[in-house]
Amino acid sequence: MIVTEYLAQFLHQKGIDTVFVMQGGMITRIIDGLYAQGSIRIVSMHHEQGASFAADAFSRITNKPGIALATSGPGATNLITGIGSCYFDSVPAIFITGQVNLTEQKGERNTRQIGFQETDIIPIVRPITKAAFAVRCANDIPAILEEAYRVATEKRPGPVLVDIPMDLQKAEIVDSCQSENSGLSISNHSEKPSETLAVFTEELLVNLRKAKRPLVLAGRGVRASGMVSQFQQFVEICQLPVVTSLLGLDVIPYNHPNRIGFIGTYGNRWANFALGSCDCLLVLGSRLDLRQTGADILSFKKGKQVFQVDIDDAELNNRITGCTVVKADLKDFFNLLSSKISHKEIGSGRQSLYQPEWNREIDKKYAEKKDTDELKHIQGINPNRFIHQLAQASGLAKVITTDVGNNQMWTAQSFELTDQQQFLTSGGMGAMGYSLPAAIGACFAQNKVPVLSISGDGGFQINIQELETIKRNQLPIKMVVLNNHCLGMIRQFQDSYFDSRYHATVWDYGAPDFAAIARAYGISSYTVLTTKDIQTGINLLWEDPTTPFLLNVTMDIHTNVFPKTMFGSPITNMESEK
Protein backbone atom coordinates (compact mmCIF):
# COMPACT_ATOMS: atom_id res chain seq x y z
CA MET A 1 0.00 0.00 0.00
CA ILE A 2 1.32 3.43 -0.89
CA VAL A 3 1.27 6.36 1.54
CA THR A 4 -1.72 8.16 0.02
CA GLU A 5 -3.79 4.96 0.10
CA TYR A 6 -2.86 4.37 3.71
CA LEU A 7 -3.77 7.94 4.69
CA ALA A 8 -7.22 7.62 3.11
CA GLN A 9 -7.78 4.27 4.80
CA PHE A 10 -6.64 5.67 8.15
CA LEU A 11 -9.10 8.57 8.06
CA HIS A 12 -11.92 6.25 7.02
CA GLN A 13 -11.19 3.85 9.87
CA LYS A 14 -11.21 6.75 12.35
CA GLY A 15 -14.69 7.69 11.19
CA ILE A 16 -13.58 10.91 9.52
CA ASP A 17 -15.62 11.40 6.35
CA THR A 18 -14.83 15.01 5.41
CA VAL A 19 -11.64 16.95 4.69
CA PHE A 20 -11.21 20.61 3.72
CA VAL A 21 -8.64 21.47 1.09
CA MET A 22 -7.14 24.18 -1.06
CA GLN A 23 -5.60 22.32 -3.96
CA GLY A 24 -1.90 22.75 -4.69
CA GLY A 25 0.97 21.02 -6.43
CA MET A 26 2.44 19.21 -3.43
CA ILE A 27 -0.88 17.69 -2.26
CA THR A 28 -2.35 16.61 -5.59
CA ARG A 29 -1.36 13.00 -4.91
CA ILE A 30 -2.92 13.04 -1.44
CA ILE A 31 -6.18 14.51 -2.68
CA ASP A 32 -6.29 12.02 -5.55
CA GLY A 33 -5.77 9.21 -3.04
CA LEU A 34 -8.61 10.47 -0.88
CA TYR A 35 -10.86 10.67 -3.94
CA ALA A 36 -9.96 7.11 -4.96
CA GLN A 37 -10.89 5.84 -1.48
CA GLY A 38 -14.46 6.76 -2.27
CA SER A 39 -16.01 7.42 1.14
CA ILE A 40 -14.28 10.68 2.09
CA ARG A 41 -15.90 13.95 1.09
CA ILE A 42 -13.38 16.48 -0.23
CA VAL A 43 -14.56 20.05 0.31
CA SER A 44 -12.68 22.44 -1.95
CA MET A 45 -12.25 25.88 -0.38
CA HIS A 46 -10.90 29.09 -1.92
CA HIS A 47 -8.21 29.87 0.66
CA GLU A 48 -6.22 27.74 3.08
CA GLN A 49 -7.35 29.93 5.99
CA GLY A 50 -10.92 29.12 5.05
CA ALA A 51 -10.06 25.42 5.02
CA SER A 52 -8.43 25.66 8.44
CA PHE A 53 -11.42 27.47 10.00
CA ALA A 54 -13.81 24.96 8.43
CA ALA A 55 -11.78 22.10 9.94
CA ASP A 56 -11.80 23.90 13.30
CA ALA A 57 -15.61 24.15 13.27
CA PHE A 58 -16.07 20.61 11.98
CA SER A 59 -14.06 19.36 14.95
CA ARG A 60 -15.97 21.43 17.51
CA ILE A 61 -19.23 19.92 16.30
CA THR A 62 -18.15 16.28 15.87
CA ASN A 63 -15.54 16.04 18.66
CA LYS A 64 -13.28 14.34 16.13
CA PRO A 65 -10.20 15.94 14.59
CA GLY A 66 -11.02 18.28 11.76
CA ILE A 67 -8.77 17.75 8.73
CA ALA A 68 -7.37 20.46 6.47
CA LEU A 69 -4.86 20.01 3.64
CA ALA A 70 -2.57 22.54 2.00
CA THR A 71 0.38 22.54 -0.32
CA SER A 72 3.91 23.59 0.63
CA GLY A 73 5.11 27.17 0.99
CA PRO A 74 2.24 29.71 0.91
CA GLY A 75 -0.34 26.95 1.31
CA ALA A 76 1.19 25.79 4.55
CA THR A 77 1.76 29.27 5.92
CA ASN A 78 -1.82 30.28 5.07
CA LEU A 79 -3.01 27.60 7.51
CA ILE A 80 -1.26 29.24 10.45
CA THR A 81 -4.10 31.43 11.74
CA GLY A 82 -6.48 28.48 11.78
CA ILE A 83 -3.88 26.29 13.47
CA GLY A 84 -3.43 28.95 16.14
CA SER A 85 -7.19 29.25 16.62
CA CYS A 86 -7.40 25.51 17.28
CA TYR A 87 -4.46 25.65 19.66
CA PHE A 88 -5.74 28.49 21.82
CA ASP A 89 -9.34 27.21 21.87
CA SER A 90 -8.39 23.56 22.54
CA VAL A 91 -9.76 22.12 19.29
CA PRO A 92 -8.41 18.77 18.01
CA ALA A 93 -7.36 19.01 14.37
CA ILE A 94 -4.89 17.40 12.00
CA PHE A 95 -3.32 19.65 9.39
CA ILE A 96 -1.61 17.84 6.53
CA THR A 97 0.81 19.73 4.33
CA GLY A 98 2.57 18.63 1.20
CA GLN A 99 6.30 19.25 0.95
CA VAL A 100 8.84 19.26 -1.86
CA ASN A 101 10.68 16.04 -2.67
CA LEU A 102 13.30 14.95 -0.16
CA THR A 103 15.98 15.47 -2.81
CA GLU A 104 14.88 19.11 -3.23
CA GLN A 105 15.09 20.04 0.45
CA LYS A 106 17.97 22.19 1.66
CA GLY A 107 18.48 20.23 4.86
CA GLU A 108 21.47 21.60 6.78
CA ARG A 109 22.86 23.54 3.83
CA ASN A 110 23.33 27.27 4.37
CA THR A 111 20.89 28.41 1.73
CA ARG A 112 17.39 29.76 1.97
CA GLN A 113 15.67 27.39 -0.44
CA ILE A 114 16.33 24.73 -3.03
CA GLY A 115 12.93 23.38 -4.11
CA PHE A 116 10.23 25.68 -5.50
CA GLN A 117 7.95 26.74 -2.59
CA GLU A 118 10.17 24.82 -0.18
CA THR A 119 9.35 26.09 3.29
CA ASP A 120 10.22 24.29 6.50
CA ILE A 121 6.80 24.54 8.13
CA ILE A 122 7.64 22.40 11.18
CA PRO A 123 9.60 24.97 13.26
CA ILE A 124 7.14 27.69 12.20
CA VAL A 125 4.08 25.94 13.63
CA ARG A 126 5.70 24.15 16.55
CA PRO A 127 4.77 26.90 19.10
CA ILE A 128 1.08 26.65 18.14
CA THR A 129 0.68 22.89 17.81
CA LYS A 130 0.75 20.03 20.27
CA ALA A 131 3.10 18.22 17.87
CA ALA A 132 4.49 18.65 14.37
CA PHE A 133 5.84 15.73 12.32
CA ALA A 134 8.14 15.88 9.30
CA VAL A 135 7.87 12.58 7.47
CA ARG A 136 11.24 11.29 6.31
CA CYS A 137 10.42 7.63 5.66
CA ALA A 138 7.24 6.16 4.17
CA ASN A 139 7.27 3.33 6.68
CA ASP A 140 6.86 5.86 9.50
CA ILE A 141 3.45 6.96 8.27
CA PRO A 142 1.31 4.40 10.20
CA ALA A 143 2.92 5.26 13.53
CA ILE A 144 2.97 9.00 12.85
CA LEU A 145 -0.71 9.12 11.95
CA GLU A 146 -1.70 7.14 15.03
CA GLU A 147 0.43 9.41 17.20
CA ALA A 148 -0.97 12.53 15.55
CA TYR A 149 -4.54 11.41 16.20
CA ARG A 150 -3.80 10.48 19.80
CA VAL A 151 -1.96 13.71 20.59
CA ALA A 152 -4.68 15.85 19.00
CA THR A 153 -7.48 14.26 21.01
CA GLU A 154 -6.04 13.26 24.38
CA LYS A 155 -5.85 15.43 27.52
CA ARG A 156 -6.29 19.08 26.51
CA PRO A 157 -7.11 18.78 22.79
CA GLY A 158 -5.30 20.75 20.13
CA PRO A 159 -3.89 20.73 16.61
CA VAL A 160 -1.06 18.70 15.11
CA LEU A 161 0.62 19.02 11.73
CA VAL A 162 1.99 16.28 9.48
CA ASP A 163 4.28 17.38 6.63
CA ILE A 164 4.65 14.80 3.82
CA PRO A 165 7.14 15.21 0.94
CA MET A 166 5.75 14.71 -2.56
CA ASP A 167 8.00 11.76 -3.42
CA LEU A 168 7.06 9.87 -0.24
CA GLN A 169 3.36 10.24 -1.00
CA LYS A 170 3.68 7.61 -3.74
CA ALA A 171 6.13 5.40 -1.82
CA GLU A 172 5.24 1.90 -0.66
CA ILE A 173 4.85 1.25 3.06
CA VAL A 174 6.83 -1.94 3.68
CA ASP A 175 8.11 -2.02 7.26
CA SER A 176 8.58 0.33 10.19
CA CYS A 177 11.89 2.17 10.20
CA GLN A 178 10.98 5.13 12.49
CA SER A 179 13.57 7.53 11.17
CA GLU A 180 15.36 9.76 13.62
CA ASN A 181 14.02 12.94 12.02
CA SER A 182 10.32 12.08 12.03
CA GLY A 183 9.71 13.76 15.38
CA LEU A 184 7.96 10.59 16.55
CA SER A 185 8.13 9.56 20.18
CA ILE A 186 5.65 6.88 21.20
CA SER A 187 5.17 6.05 24.84
CA ASN A 188 2.51 4.85 27.24
CA HIS A 189 0.44 7.92 28.02
CA SER A 190 -2.20 6.32 30.23
CA GLU A 191 -2.91 8.40 33.27
CA LYS A 192 -5.17 7.77 36.26
CA PRO A 193 -7.46 10.51 37.53
CA SER A 194 -5.77 12.73 40.07
CA GLU A 195 -5.69 11.20 43.54
CA THR A 196 -6.35 14.67 44.94
CA LEU A 197 -9.70 14.99 43.16
CA ALA A 198 -11.67 13.49 46.02
CA VAL A 199 -9.99 15.82 48.53
CA PHE A 200 -10.60 18.80 46.24
CA THR A 201 -14.27 17.89 45.82
CA GLU A 202 -14.82 17.54 49.55
CA GLU A 203 -13.26 20.94 50.21
CA LEU A 204 -15.32 22.47 47.40
CA LEU A 205 -18.58 21.12 48.84
CA VAL A 206 -17.73 22.36 52.32
CA ASN A 207 -17.14 25.87 50.97
CA LEU A 208 -20.22 25.83 48.75
CA ARG A 209 -22.37 24.96 51.76
CA LYS A 210 -20.88 27.87 53.70
CA ALA A 211 -21.13 30.34 50.82
CA LYS A 212 -23.71 33.12 50.82
CA ARG A 213 -22.96 34.09 47.20
CA PRO A 214 -21.90 30.92 45.31
CA LEU A 215 -21.31 31.01 41.56
CA VAL A 216 -20.16 28.70 38.75
CA LEU A 217 -18.12 29.96 35.77
CA ALA A 218 -18.35 27.54 32.84
CA GLY A 219 -16.02 27.56 29.85
CA ARG A 220 -15.55 25.61 26.65
CA GLY A 221 -14.00 22.73 28.59
CA VAL A 222 -17.48 21.65 29.67
CA ARG A 223 -18.51 20.95 26.07
CA ALA A 224 -15.07 19.76 24.96
CA SER A 225 -15.21 17.07 27.66
CA GLY A 226 -18.70 15.99 26.59
CA MET A 227 -20.14 16.89 29.98
CA VAL A 228 -22.88 19.38 29.07
CA SER A 229 -25.80 17.30 30.37
CA GLN A 230 -23.91 16.31 33.53
CA PHE A 231 -23.00 19.95 34.14
CA GLN A 232 -26.61 21.07 33.79
CA GLN A 233 -27.78 18.31 36.09
CA PHE A 234 -25.26 19.39 38.72
CA VAL A 235 -26.25 23.07 38.73
CA GLU A 236 -29.96 22.20 38.69
CA ILE A 237 -29.77 19.83 41.65
CA CYS A 238 -27.54 22.14 43.64
CA GLN A 239 -29.41 25.28 42.51
CA LEU A 240 -26.22 27.15 41.67
CA PRO A 241 -26.22 30.29 39.49
CA VAL A 242 -24.06 30.04 36.34
CA VAL A 243 -22.12 32.57 34.28
CA THR A 244 -20.28 31.58 31.13
CA SER A 245 -17.20 32.64 29.23
CA LEU A 246 -17.45 33.54 25.54
CA LEU A 247 -16.59 29.98 24.48
CA GLY A 248 -18.88 28.51 27.14
CA LEU A 249 -22.03 30.29 25.96
CA ASP A 250 -23.66 27.10 24.68
CA VAL A 251 -23.16 24.87 27.73
CA ILE A 252 -26.41 26.14 29.25
CA PRO A 253 -29.46 27.46 27.35
CA TYR A 254 -30.32 31.16 27.44
CA ASN A 255 -33.64 30.56 29.21
CA HIS A 256 -32.30 28.06 31.75
CA PRO A 257 -33.34 29.20 35.26
CA ASN A 258 -29.79 28.84 36.60
CA ARG A 259 -28.16 30.87 33.83
CA ILE A 260 -27.12 34.41 34.75
CA GLY A 261 -25.30 35.55 31.62
CA PHE A 262 -22.08 36.16 29.74
CA ILE A 263 -19.04 37.60 31.55
CA GLY A 264 -15.95 39.49 30.49
CA THR A 265 -14.74 42.79 29.11
CA TYR A 266 -17.97 43.20 27.14
CA GLY A 267 -20.04 40.88 29.32
CA ASN A 268 -23.56 41.37 30.59
CA ARG A 269 -23.47 43.97 33.35
CA TRP A 270 -25.35 41.80 35.85
CA ALA A 271 -23.19 38.74 35.08
CA ASN A 272 -20.01 40.71 35.77
CA PHE A 273 -21.59 41.91 39.02
CA ALA A 274 -22.15 38.30 40.03
CA LEU A 275 -18.59 37.33 39.09
CA GLY A 276 -17.07 40.23 40.98
CA SER A 277 -19.30 39.89 44.05
CA CYS A 278 -19.46 36.13 44.64
CA ASP A 279 -17.76 34.64 47.69
CA CYS A 280 -17.23 31.11 46.35
CA LEU A 281 -16.46 30.63 42.65
CA LEU A 282 -16.21 27.27 40.92
CA VAL A 283 -14.40 27.53 37.56
CA LEU A 284 -14.95 24.62 35.16
CA GLY A 285 -12.95 24.37 31.93
CA SER A 286 -12.11 28.06 31.71
CA ARG A 287 -8.69 29.65 32.01
CA LEU A 288 -9.51 32.94 33.78
CA ASP A 289 -7.83 35.09 31.17
CA LEU A 290 -7.55 38.88 31.18
CA ARG A 291 -10.84 39.44 29.36
CA GLN A 292 -12.69 37.36 31.95
CA THR A 293 -11.25 38.78 35.15
CA GLY A 294 -10.18 42.29 34.19
CA ALA A 295 -6.70 43.67 34.80
CA ASP A 296 -7.32 44.36 38.50
CA ILE A 297 -6.52 40.91 39.87
CA LEU A 298 -6.53 41.96 43.52
CA SER A 299 -10.06 43.29 43.17
CA PHE A 300 -11.17 40.11 41.42
CA LYS A 301 -9.79 37.87 44.20
CA LYS A 302 -11.03 40.01 47.08
CA GLY A 303 -13.58 38.31 49.31
CA LYS A 304 -13.85 35.09 47.35
CA GLN A 305 -12.49 31.56 47.41
CA VAL A 306 -11.81 30.29 43.88
CA PHE A 307 -11.98 26.58 43.03
CA GLN A 308 -10.75 25.60 39.58
CA VAL A 309 -10.86 22.32 37.66
CA ASP A 310 -8.84 22.13 34.46
CA ILE A 311 -7.21 19.38 32.43
CA ASP A 312 -4.14 21.56 31.80
CA ASP A 313 -2.13 22.26 34.95
CA ALA A 314 -0.46 25.23 33.22
CA GLU A 315 -3.80 27.06 33.51
CA LEU A 316 -4.11 26.45 37.26
CA ASN A 317 -3.01 29.27 39.57
CA ASN A 318 -1.73 31.07 36.51
CA ARG A 319 -2.90 34.70 36.42
CA ILE A 320 -5.22 34.28 39.40
CA THR A 321 -3.12 32.74 42.16
CA GLY A 322 -4.13 31.41 45.56
CA CYS A 323 -6.93 29.28 44.12
CA THR A 324 -7.82 25.78 45.27
CA VAL A 325 -7.14 23.79 42.13
CA VAL A 326 -7.08 20.30 40.74
CA LYS A 327 -5.79 18.99 37.42
CA ALA A 328 -8.53 16.67 36.25
CA ASP A 329 -10.71 15.73 33.34
CA LEU A 330 -14.20 17.10 33.89
CA LYS A 331 -15.51 13.59 33.19
CA ASP A 332 -13.81 12.37 36.37
CA PHE A 333 -14.98 15.43 38.30
CA PHE A 334 -18.63 15.00 37.34
CA ASN A 335 -18.51 11.23 37.88
CA LEU A 336 -17.40 11.89 41.45
CA LEU A 337 -20.03 14.58 41.93
CA SER A 338 -22.79 12.33 40.60
CA SER A 339 -21.97 9.72 43.22
CA LYS A 340 -22.24 12.35 45.93
CA ILE A 341 -25.51 13.63 44.51
CA SER A 342 -26.88 10.09 44.40
CA HIS A 343 -25.91 9.66 48.04
CA LYS A 344 -27.68 12.95 48.79
CA GLU A 345 -24.55 14.61 50.14
CA ILE A 346 -25.53 17.75 48.22
CA GLY A 347 -28.51 19.19 46.52
CA SER A 348 -31.46 17.56 48.27
CA GLY A 349 -33.95 19.36 50.47
CA ARG A 350 -32.34 21.44 53.19
CA GLN A 351 -28.91 20.71 51.75
CA SER A 352 -29.69 22.66 48.57
CA LEU A 353 -27.11 25.37 47.92
CA TYR A 354 -29.72 27.89 46.77
CA GLN A 355 -29.27 31.35 48.28
CA PRO A 356 -32.45 33.42 47.67
CA GLU A 357 -30.99 36.75 48.78
CA TRP A 358 -28.01 36.35 46.45
CA ASN A 359 -30.27 35.57 43.52
CA ARG A 360 -32.42 38.59 44.29
CA GLU A 361 -29.32 40.80 44.21
CA ILE A 362 -28.44 39.52 40.75
CA ASP A 363 -32.02 39.92 39.52
CA LYS A 364 -32.02 43.51 40.78
CA LYS A 365 -28.86 44.28 38.80
CA TYR A 366 -30.45 42.78 35.70
CA ALA A 367 -33.57 44.89 36.14
CA GLU A 368 -31.53 48.08 36.56
CA LYS A 369 -30.08 47.90 33.04
CA LYS A 370 -30.78 45.12 30.58
CA ASP A 371 -28.66 44.52 27.48
CA THR A 372 -31.32 46.13 25.29
CA ASP A 373 -31.14 49.30 27.41
CA GLU A 374 -27.40 49.88 26.94
CA LEU A 375 -27.77 51.90 23.71
CA LYS A 376 -30.82 54.04 24.43
CA HIS A 377 -29.62 57.01 22.37
CA ILE A 378 -28.47 55.07 19.34
CA GLN A 379 -29.34 56.30 15.85
CA GLY A 380 -30.93 53.58 13.77
CA ILE A 381 -30.92 49.87 14.53
CA ASN A 382 -30.20 48.71 18.08
CA PRO A 383 -27.92 45.68 17.64
CA ASN A 384 -28.88 44.00 20.93
CA ARG A 385 -32.58 44.22 20.15
CA PHE A 386 -31.92 42.97 16.63
CA ILE A 387 -29.97 39.97 17.93
CA HIS A 388 -32.88 39.02 20.21
CA GLN A 389 -35.27 39.20 17.24
CA LEU A 390 -32.89 37.20 15.08
CA ALA A 391 -32.47 34.52 17.74
CA GLN A 392 -36.20 34.13 18.28
CA ALA A 393 -36.67 33.53 14.55
CA SER A 394 -33.65 31.21 14.11
CA GLY A 395 -34.65 28.10 15.99
CA LEU A 396 -33.90 25.97 12.93
CA ALA A 397 -30.20 26.90 13.05
CA LYS A 398 -28.31 24.14 14.82
CA VAL A 399 -25.08 26.16 14.94
CA ILE A 400 -24.42 29.87 15.30
CA THR A 401 -21.01 31.18 14.25
CA THR A 402 -19.70 34.69 14.73
CA ASP A 403 -16.75 36.66 13.53
CA VAL A 404 -14.57 38.78 15.85
CA GLY A 405 -15.42 42.34 16.79
CA ASN A 406 -18.64 44.14 17.69
CA ASN A 407 -20.79 41.47 16.04
CA GLN A 408 -19.27 38.83 18.30
CA MET A 409 -19.95 40.80 21.47
CA TRP A 410 -23.52 41.80 20.56
CA THR A 411 -24.25 38.15 19.79
CA ALA A 412 -22.69 36.93 23.04
CA GLN A 413 -24.62 39.53 25.03
CA SER A 414 -28.03 38.91 23.51
CA PHE A 415 -28.44 35.74 21.42
CA GLU A 416 -31.01 33.40 22.96
CA LEU A 417 -29.31 30.03 22.47
CA THR A 418 -31.49 26.96 22.90
CA ASP A 419 -30.38 23.58 24.22
CA GLN A 420 -30.28 22.35 20.60
CA GLN A 421 -27.83 24.99 19.39
CA GLN A 422 -24.06 25.33 19.53
CA PHE A 423 -22.09 28.56 19.41
CA LEU A 424 -18.74 28.79 17.61
CA THR A 425 -16.30 31.69 17.52
CA SER A 426 -12.57 32.31 17.58
CA GLY A 427 -11.72 33.04 21.20
CA GLY A 428 -8.03 33.04 22.07
CA MET A 429 -6.79 33.86 18.57
CA GLY A 430 -9.60 36.33 17.99
CA ALA A 431 -9.40 35.89 14.22
CA MET A 432 -11.55 38.03 11.97
CA GLY A 433 -12.76 36.06 8.97
CA TYR A 434 -13.71 33.04 11.11
CA SER A 435 -17.49 33.01 10.87
CA LEU A 436 -18.13 32.26 7.20
CA PRO A 437 -15.74 29.29 6.70
CA ALA A 438 -16.58 28.02 10.20
CA ALA A 439 -20.24 27.95 9.17
CA ILE A 440 -19.24 25.80 6.18
CA GLY A 441 -17.40 23.33 8.44
CA ALA A 442 -20.29 23.23 10.91
CA CYS A 443 -22.84 22.73 8.14
CA PHE A 444 -20.99 19.72 6.74
CA ALA A 445 -20.52 18.35 10.26
CA GLN A 446 -24.30 18.51 10.79
CA ASN A 447 -25.12 16.91 7.44
CA LYS A 448 -26.19 20.18 5.87
CA VAL A 449 -28.71 21.38 8.44
CA PRO A 450 -29.20 25.16 8.67
CA VAL A 451 -26.38 27.21 10.20
CA LEU A 452 -26.50 30.90 11.10
CA SER A 453 -23.35 32.94 10.42
CA ILE A 454 -23.07 36.42 11.97
CA SER A 455 -20.27 38.75 10.85
CA GLY A 456 -19.27 42.39 10.74
CA ASP A 457 -18.54 44.09 7.44
CA GLY A 458 -14.79 44.00 8.14
CA GLY A 459 -14.52 40.34 9.04
CA PHE A 460 -16.88 39.22 6.30
CA GLN A 461 -14.56 40.62 3.64
CA ILE A 462 -11.61 38.56 4.87
CA ASN A 463 -13.03 35.26 3.61
CA ILE A 464 -15.82 36.55 1.36
CA GLN A 465 -14.60 34.25 -1.42
CA GLU A 466 -16.15 31.29 0.41
CA LEU A 467 -19.57 32.46 -0.75
CA GLU A 468 -18.81 30.39 -3.85
CA THR A 469 -18.18 27.32 -1.69
CA ILE A 470 -21.58 27.82 -0.06
CA LYS A 471 -23.35 28.23 -3.39
CA ARG A 472 -21.56 25.33 -5.10
CA ASN A 473 -22.50 22.95 -2.30
CA GLN A 474 -25.97 24.49 -1.81
CA LEU A 475 -25.37 24.82 1.92
CA PRO A 476 -28.31 26.19 3.98
CA ILE A 477 -26.16 28.85 5.62
CA LYS A 478 -27.98 32.00 6.68
CA MET A 479 -25.52 34.91 6.67
CA VAL A 480 -26.11 38.10 8.62
CA VAL A 481 -23.70 41.00 8.12
CA LEU A 482 -23.95 43.66 10.84
CA ASN A 483 -22.71 46.48 8.64
CA ASN A 484 -21.61 49.62 10.51
CA HIS A 485 -19.36 50.68 7.60
CA CYS A 486 -16.14 50.54 9.64
CA LEU A 487 -13.99 48.38 11.87
CA GLY A 488 -16.26 49.20 14.77
CA MET A 489 -14.48 47.80 17.80
CA ILE A 490 -11.22 49.53 16.95
CA ARG A 491 -13.11 52.69 15.97
CA GLN A 492 -14.65 52.71 19.45
CA PHE A 493 -11.16 52.25 20.89
CA GLN A 494 -9.93 55.21 18.83
CA ASP A 495 -12.76 57.33 20.27
CA SER A 496 -11.63 56.47 23.79
CA TYR A 497 -7.86 56.74 23.46
CA PHE A 498 -6.90 58.47 20.17
CA ASP A 499 -9.17 61.52 20.02
CA SER A 500 -11.28 59.92 17.29
CA ARG A 501 -8.45 59.68 14.77
CA TYR A 502 -9.93 56.92 12.63
CA HIS A 503 -6.88 55.65 10.77
CA ALA A 504 -7.70 52.49 8.77
CA THR A 505 -11.06 51.99 10.50
CA VAL A 506 -13.19 54.72 8.95
CA TRP A 507 -10.59 56.67 7.04
CA ASP A 508 -9.12 54.61 4.19
CA TYR A 509 -11.68 51.88 4.77
CA GLY A 510 -14.52 50.68 2.57
CA ALA A 511 -16.90 47.82 1.92
CA PRO A 512 -18.92 46.71 -1.10
CA ASP A 513 -22.66 46.23 -1.44
CA PHE A 514 -22.84 42.83 0.26
CA ALA A 515 -26.33 42.09 -1.03
CA ALA A 516 -25.12 42.67 -4.58
CA ILE A 517 -22.02 40.55 -4.01
CA ALA A 518 -24.19 37.69 -2.74
CA ARG A 519 -26.41 37.92 -5.81
CA ALA A 520 -23.30 37.83 -8.01
CA TYR A 521 -22.53 34.45 -6.45
CA GLY A 522 -26.12 33.33 -7.06
CA ILE A 523 -27.23 33.73 -3.43
CA SER A 524 -30.44 35.56 -2.56
CA SER A 525 -30.08 38.62 -0.33
CA TYR A 526 -31.80 41.60 1.26
CA THR A 527 -30.62 44.84 2.85
CA VAL A 528 -32.14 46.14 6.08
CA LEU A 529 -31.92 49.94 6.11
CA THR A 530 -34.19 50.85 9.05
CA THR A 531 -35.89 49.18 12.00
CA LYS A 532 -39.03 48.92 9.85
CA ASP A 533 -37.17 46.55 7.51
CA ILE A 534 -36.01 44.13 10.20
CA GLN A 535 -38.98 41.79 10.28
CA THR A 536 -39.16 41.64 6.49
CA GLY A 537 -35.46 40.82 6.36
CA ILE A 538 -35.70 38.08 8.98
CA ASN A 539 -38.73 36.58 7.26
CA LEU A 540 -36.85 36.44 3.97
CA LEU A 541 -33.79 34.98 5.71
CA TRP A 542 -35.80 31.97 6.84
CA GLU A 543 -38.38 31.81 4.05
CA ASP A 544 -36.63 28.75 2.62
CA PRO A 545 -34.57 26.98 5.31
CA THR A 546 -32.88 24.76 2.70
CA THR A 547 -31.05 27.49 0.77
CA PRO A 548 -28.34 30.05 1.54
CA PHE A 549 -29.33 33.67 2.13
CA LEU A 550 -27.49 36.87 3.03
CA LEU A 551 -29.03 39.61 5.17
CA ASN A 552 -27.12 42.90 5.10
CA VAL A 553 -28.07 44.95 8.18
CA THR A 554 -26.97 48.57 8.03
CA MET A 555 -26.10 50.35 11.26
CA ASP A 556 -24.90 53.77 12.22
CA ILE A 557 -21.12 54.10 12.02
CA HIS A 558 -20.96 55.13 15.69
CA THR A 559 -22.82 52.09 17.01
CA ASN A 560 -20.78 50.99 20.05
CA VAL A 561 -20.64 47.96 22.30
CA PHE A 562 -21.67 48.59 25.88
CA PRO A 563 -21.17 47.81 28.66
CA LYS A 564 -17.38 47.68 28.49
CA THR A 565 -15.00 47.17 31.39
CA MET A 566 -12.82 50.22 31.87
CA PHE A 567 -9.15 49.46 31.26
CA GLY A 568 -7.28 48.64 34.48
CA SER A 569 -10.51 48.65 36.51
CA PRO A 570 -12.34 45.85 38.33
CA ILE A 571 -14.53 43.66 36.14
CA THR A 572 -17.60 45.26 37.73
CA ASN A 573 -16.60 48.81 36.73
CA MET A 574 -18.16 49.06 33.29
CA GLU A 575 -18.49 52.00 30.93
CA SER A 576 -21.89 53.14 29.70
CA GLU A 577 -23.15 55.03 26.70
CA LYS A 578 -22.46 58.75 27.14
Image: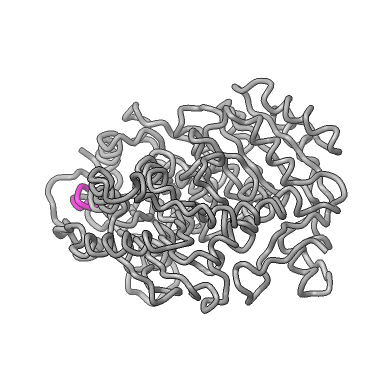
- Tally the marks: 0
Tell whether 248 sits left or right of 434. left
| Residue at the (12%, 48%) spot, across then down | 175
- Is 144 in the magenta? yes
Query: From the image, which quarter does the C terminus lie in?
Result: bottom right
Image spot of residue 100 (x, y percent)? 38, 55
- The x and y percentages for residue 406 are 69, 54
In this view, the residue in front, 332 or 403, is 332
Q: Can residue 22 be seen in this snapshot? A: no
Q: Is residue 239 magenta?
A: no
Whether residue 503 is situated above or below residue 461 in the rendered picture? below
Closest to the observer, 544 or 21: 544
For the rendered model, the colour scheme is one colour
Q: In the rendered image, which quarter is residue 233 located in?
A: top left
Rendering coords of residue 31 (x, y %) = 39, 38
Q: Quadrant of the N terminus?
A: top left
> Residue furthest toward the left?
175
437 or 452, which is in the foreground?
A: 452
Q: Residue at x 65, y 58 (%)?
A: 269
Q: Give left or right: position of 577 versus 196.
A: right
Q: Where residue 417 sits: x, y (%)?
A: 56, 39
The image quadrant of residue 86 is bottom left
Depth order, front residue of 277/382: 277
Image vertical order of residue 260 relative to residue 429, above or below:
above
Residue 498, relative to residue 248: is it above or below? below
Q: Is residue 162 above or below residue 287?
A: above
The residues colored magenta run 139-145
